[in-house]
Amino acid sequence: MAQFDVHRNQGLQRDTMPFVVLVQSGKYDSYRGRVVVPLVRRSALSATTPTVGSRLNPVLSVQGLELVLHPLDMGSVAVDQLGDYVASFGQSRRTDRSGPERIAQQHLSLRASALLYQRPSINFQDEACCKCIAPGRLNGAH
């Protein structure tokens, strides 16, 4: 298991949250739990939800499903309760990422750092990964 791996959600809410993203550092692999962030089906959210597509709740695609990252619902899951590995937004499994996959991995990394270290004021517009996106896309409109 590597940071930013995507696993099937085996919990009761798996219909609306089919996957979780592992955000815990590999430094803590000896612990029996993993910190995960749910990926919620976009169709399960109200069309008027203001944060969908924002830098806090980016829209990502896994196995053809349009999903929304929900970092405010992050939690800990026992390793034996994680479902099958399905994808990764990290570079440890695949290093040939380009375009949207690379951007998603970099933004997940920045967001996870900001949330885990309680630094929500990171200005994503100034980060290197944002230079490949049209200016202004991350100022609340991402």
Image (cartoon, rainbow, N blue to C red):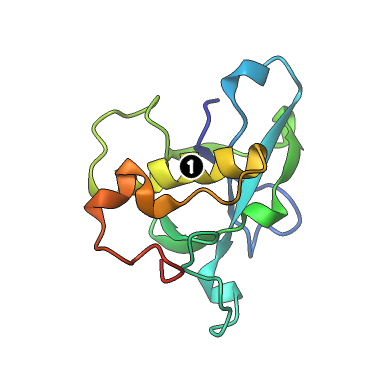
Residue at the spot 56% in from the left edge and 85% down from the top edge: 48
Number of labelled discs?
Answer: 1
**Which of the two residues, 125 or 116, is positioned nearer the viewer here?**
125
Residue at the spot 52% in from the left edge and 26% down from the top edge: 2
**Which of the two residues, 103 or 16, is positioned nearer the viewer here?**
103
Residue at the spot 53% in from the left edge and 30% down from the top edge: 3
Q: Residue 22: in sight, yes or no? A: no
Dot 1 falls on a residue whose secondary structure is: helix
Dot 1, crowdedness within 10 Å: few (<14), some or many (≥20)?
some
Residue at the spot 53% in from the left edge and 83% down from the top edge: 47
Q: Residue 74: in sight, yes or no? A: yes
**Residue 27 pos. (x, y %):** 62, 17
Q: Quadrant of the N terminus?
A: top right
Residue 25 against residue 113 in the figure, above or below: above
In the image: residue 18, left or right of residue 132? right
**Residue 91 pos. (x, y %):** 37, 29
**Which of the two residues, 127 or 101, is positioned nearer the viewer here?**
127
Q: Quadrant of residue 22?
A: top right
Amino acid identity at mark 1: Leu
**Residue 62 pos. (x, y %):** 43, 53
* Residue, disc 1: 110
Q: Quadrant of the C terminus?
A: bottom left
Residue 11 against residue 79 in the figure, above or below: below
**Which of the two residues, 3 or 117, is positioned nearer the viewer here?**
117
**Which residue appears farthest toward the bottom when viewing the image?**
48
